Image (tube, grey):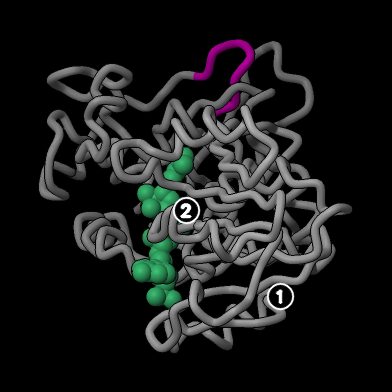
Amino acid sequence: MKAIVHTEYGSPEVLHLQEVPKPIPKDNEVLIKIHATTVNRNDCGFRKPEYPFIIRPINGLFKPKRKILGTELAGEIESIGKNVKTLKPGDKVFGLSAWKFGAHAEYISVPEDGSISFMPTNISYNEAAAICDGAYLALNNLRKINFKKIKSILINGASGSIGSSAVQLAKYYGTSITGLCNTKNLELIKSLGADFVIDYTKEDFTKNGQHYDVVFDAVGKSSFFKCKKILNSGGTYFSTELGYLSQNIFLALFTRLFNGKKVLFPIPKDRKEDIVFFKELIEAGKYRAVVDRVYPMNQFVEATKYVETGMKTGSVVISIDHT
Ligand SMILES: NC(=O)c1ccc[n+]([C@@H]2O[C@H](COP(=O)([O-])OP(=O)(O)OC[C@H]3O[C@@H](n4cnc5c(N)ncnc54)[C@H](OP(=O)(O)O)[C@@H]3O)[C@@H](O)[C@H]2O)c1
């Protein structure tokens, strides 16, 4: 089968389209013929690597252990292991291979109880591939919030993969949402459910006199120290980035010792039931994929370079045509 392989850390040019053996599903696994995957910031973070002191101990000090990246997938089950009960050949599925990766390929083997579910009936493979990474990372933070107790949330980077998911999920949970984005994305963010939008190219959100119960920096461009003054008493700050000198980890540990404003930095955890939840939201018309660009597999390096501009809107999809 064809896959995007890298055998060394480095720039997008270390990624090569090549032939590799097709995986054989174990007894508890299903073999999925992948029709669409994505290039996301996690893939790029592991390939560079972005935080070498974290990634190299996990993924190989000198050479990457995970040679095929890719966390998101949508496709069709081709075969199943002998113990698999709930899925069968021909089923359309979507989901995540969050820590094992391997979705930048024509096929992947995934455990039956892994983070996959039947695909929503009302979307395409390209849209289904673009759902899960941003949504599970957003949900990972939002599920720490008691939405019955808060009245407002500010989401920075509201047009990114995690941010556009956070806007839609916060809307579902029910609170007043202020989304921060570039001029070109203001209408998109409103259409996803933001009650108020701020154009960060024209206005400093920390200086307009507004206050929030939660600030969720989905793109890691602010800091707790910058946002503390716009948090209401007892408010919470989340960021998807570790921050300067990994400060958000230390602040999460330190601020929990006191009663005041807090930093939370939950470790991402993917779960099958969350993928099922996303499927139900999509079928109910309460959630949609935001797809920026679609590339074929042979333009993978170009797709990666675009993701690494840090300016994509939603997700960048790789469509796999199996010819
Ligand atoms: N914690 C984790 O486990 C984890 C996992 C994966 C990724 N991450 C991190 O999470 C962050 C977001 O990931 P993602 O995939 O959602 O990113 P993304 O899709 O690449 O985000 C791109 C968006 O960021 C916005 N943006 C760029 N500069 C901005 C600024 N100065 N202020 C506000 N918005 C700005 C852009 O919006 P406009 O076009 O509207 O300007 C663009 O839409 C990344 O920093 C990534 O490294 C964390």
At horizontal 70% and vertical 37% (from top left) the residue drawn is: 259
Which amino acid type is marked by label 1?
Answer: Gly
Percent x, y of residue 160: 47, 65
Report the front residue among 274 and 80: 274
Taking the image as shown, residue 119 lies to the left or right of residue 237, namely right
Q: Ligand 1 closer than 8 Å to the CB at disc 2?
A: no
Q: Residues within 10 Å of mark 2 (few under 14, many from 20)?
A: many
> Which percent across, then down, holds residue 322?
38, 50
Q: Which mark is residue 280?
A: none
Q: Which of the 4 quarters of the picture holds residue 318?
A: bottom left
Instruction: Name the kind of residue labelled 2 in the image.
Output: Ala
Image quadrant in which you'd find residue 88? top right
Range covered by the magenta-colored residues? 25-31
- Which residue: 50% across, 40% down? 33
Magenta stretch: includes residue 61: no
| Residue where numbered disc 1 is placed | 193
Residue visible at 74% across and 66% down in the picture = 152
Whether residue 40 is visible, yes or no, is no
Q: Nearer the viewer, mark 2 or mark 1?
A: 1
The picture places residue 142, in percent across and down from the top left corner, at 68, 48
From the image, tell me which residue sits under label 2. 36
Question: Could one spot residue 260 in this view of the protein?
Answer: yes
Sequence order check, earlier mark of 2 and 1: 2
Q: Quadrant of the N terminus?
A: top left
